[in-house]
Image (cartoon, grey):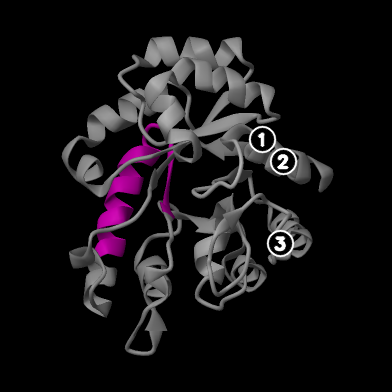
Amino acid sequence: MARIGLQLYSVKERCAADFFGTLDEVARSGYEGVEFAGYFGKSSKELKKRLADNQLVAAGSHISIEQLTGQLDEVIAYASEIESPYIICPGLPESYRDSADAYKRTGELLTKIGEKAAAANIAFGYHNHDIELTQFEGEYGLDLLFAAADPRYLFMELDTFWLEATGQKSIDWIHRYKDRIKILHMKDMNNLQELRNVEVGSGIMDFHGIHAAAKQHGVDWYTVEQEQFDKDEFDSIKESAQFLHSLR
């Protein structure tokens, strides 16, 4: 059964104001792990202890392509020290994805990064937005990227919201990529016209079907991410956690 995590970008302002206090509140909100979007100046030793104090685990870290290409040794060392099993590239500048050849080159580059991470027992993944569903030469950029990458060294973190914003269905892509998907970003939407984030289970997306497909293929983490709120952020993320727990 997939574990339930929170991408901390969801509460980024609170993290910036009081990172450790925010972790405390996330733990009280029903989450088993957190996916990082920055470490807010904390040492790996400090962070590892605070996670343990809250019975939280590291569920991955979003790391920019600039850091991955320029500071990879440091990135891997920090992730190892907090016992994070995953490093994830959260997106790409245009030059990495503006043609079929660019996607193929990027797939090869990400393979090299993933191979180095694997040597430290860390899996490396890529997180999609909607832009990767642009077609080049009749193929989606996301498919071109993953076809060019070695499956041993690059997994998919599938973002349900951004995929379905393009008219695709998450269930279809989960069956398409199967066990190559280790993490699902569980993000619901109100409708296809406004494309607003809402609490998981409260919008139009079929999360019961998504859960069934993910369970079939052994997804490791359901990671909540919400970028728009109509109520207190912690009320929203608690609702999402409660819904995901109800799927068990």
Residue 232: image quadrant is top right
Q: What's the mark number on residue 119? A: none
Residue at image mark 2 = 239
Looking at this view, is 196 or 7 the one in front?
196
Q: CA distance from mark 2 to mark 3?
A: 18 Å
Q: Is residue 242 magenta?
A: no
Mark 2 surroundings: few (<14), some (14-19) or many (≥20) residues within 10 A: some
Q: Earlier in the sequence, mark 2 or mark 3?
A: 3
Residue found at x 43% / y 60%? 128
Q: Nearer the viewer, residue 91 or 179?
A: 91
The residues tagged by marks 1 and 2 sit, at their Cα atoms, a distance apart of 6 Å
Crowd around label 1: few <14 · some 14–19 · many ≥20 (10 Å): few
- Residue beneath the point at 43% across and 73% down: 143
Establish if 33 lies above or below 124: above
Question: Image check: 143 left or right of 221?
Answer: left
Tags 1 and 2 in contact by the CB under 8 Å rule?
A: yes
Q: Secondary structure at mark 1?
A: helix
Displayed quadrant of residue 215: bottom right
Seen at 64% across and 17% down, the residue is: 55
Horizontal and vertical percent position of residue 131: 37, 70
Q: The residue under label 3 is which amino acid type?
A: Ile
The answer to whether 90 is drawn above or below residue 34 in the figure is below
Please state which of the two labelled residues, at mark 2 or mark 3, is closer to the viewer: 2
Residue 235: give its label: 1
- The answer to whether residue 172 is seen in the rendering is yes
Q: Is residue 115 magenta?
A: yes
Q: Is residue 56 left or right of residue 106?
A: right
Give residue 210's mark.
3
User: Which kind of residue does numbered mark 2 sit on?
Assistant: Glu
Q: Quadrant of the N terminus?
A: top right
Q: Earlier in the sequence, mark 1 or mark 3?
A: 3
Q: What residue span does the magenta drawing correspond to?
A: 106-126
